Image (spheres, rainbow, N blue to C red):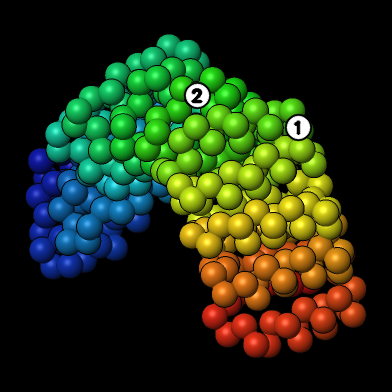
Amino acid sequence: IENPSPEKSINLFHCLNELNDHSLVQEVQTYLNRKAQWSALVFVLLNSEEELGDFDLSKYHASEDCLLKLLPVVRASKNAVLPECNLTEKSCVSLASALSSNSSCLRELNLRGNKLQDLGVKLLSAGLASPHCKLEILRVMVWGCFAASGPEQLAVIDGTRNSSVYQKILNKNVQPSVHNLKLGHCGITEEGCVALAKALTSNPSHLRELNLNNNNPGESGLKELFDLLKDPHCKLETLQLCNCCIREQDCAALGKALKSNPSSTLKNLNFSWNKIGDLGLKFLSDLLEEPHCKIQELLECCSITEEGFMDFVFVYSDLDKHAILDIL
């Protein structure tokens, strides 16, 4: 059919959909510059028997125009993957409308690498503040006023490479219901880590995962952070400290902190690319022998010798409750 009308395209797609023939979904992507095919693609995606999970804009065309045309699909999806799609504040108006709709299914929104600017952030915040907003995970490169106006149920804050998110934590403007805090590559130093740990100490019960990968927290910063693990109210399950200049004495401090808290819930520990050496590994293996230790995943790549590794294996062989994923 050459140059079909929107009505004919939709009728054709409807027939193919009833026949469970979804092959034309890929074909139609080559004709997205035509209004008829845009409408038809939206129809097919919304009427698919499969539940709409991830909507990845890059599979169609990473542009603002494409996003606006496929907005009904975004609203019906659980996860909108929109990083580096050249989106501006124009998109934020439509996304805010989608978030505030009582029919929206969005639980995760990834907007990293887009130039939303302050105006875009403010526009999007209106959607986040809506009582109908169901968003749980927000990934952004700018923070703006999200911390002050985001929904209470927002569970994950991903501020990787974004020092302004880190600063908001220090100002204690983060929702108390945040479960997952990602602050990798934020240039956090010893002084900053001390301040961050003290800020988190004020309300540690909701936090389940903390990612500080590729920062330099220093000895006193790590000590304050590990002291947080002593708190019986702390429910942290995953601690990511990859490439954080951790040394053997820091492993000793961690072991001491966890041994003092039998109710610790820590299950996953990432010490990759730190020079903890054989002695640091010995401190960790002593920790694993504790009957109340719940660590199941320990990721290591830490300048350990063959002798140190074999000593660890000797201890580990009797610890069938643990699943050590990677020791190099």
Q: Which residue is mark 1?
A: 189
- Residue at horizontal 73%, vertical 83%? 315
Establish if 102 lies above or below 16.
above
Establish if 65 lies above or below 210.
above
In this view of the protein, can residue 165 be seen by the observer? no
Q: Secondary structure at mark 2?
A: loop
| Front position among marks 1 and 2 | 2
- Residue at horizontal 86%, vertical 69%? 278
Quadrant location of the C terminus in the rendered image:
bottom right
Taking the image as shown, residue 288 lies to the left or right of residue 117, namely right
- Residue at horizontal 14%, vertical 34%? 102
Q: Which residue is mark 2?
A: 172
**Label 1 is placed on what type of residue?**
Thr
- Residue at horizontal 61%, vertical 35%? 197
Residue 207, percent from left and from top: 46, 44
Residue 126, percent from left and from top: 30, 19
Mark 1 crowdedness (10 Å alpha carbons): few <14, some 14-19, many ≥20: some
Establish if 125 lies above or below 248.
above
Mark 2 crowdedness (10 Å alpha carbons): few <14, some 14-19, many ≥20: some
Which residue occupies the foreground of this view, 293 or 68?
293
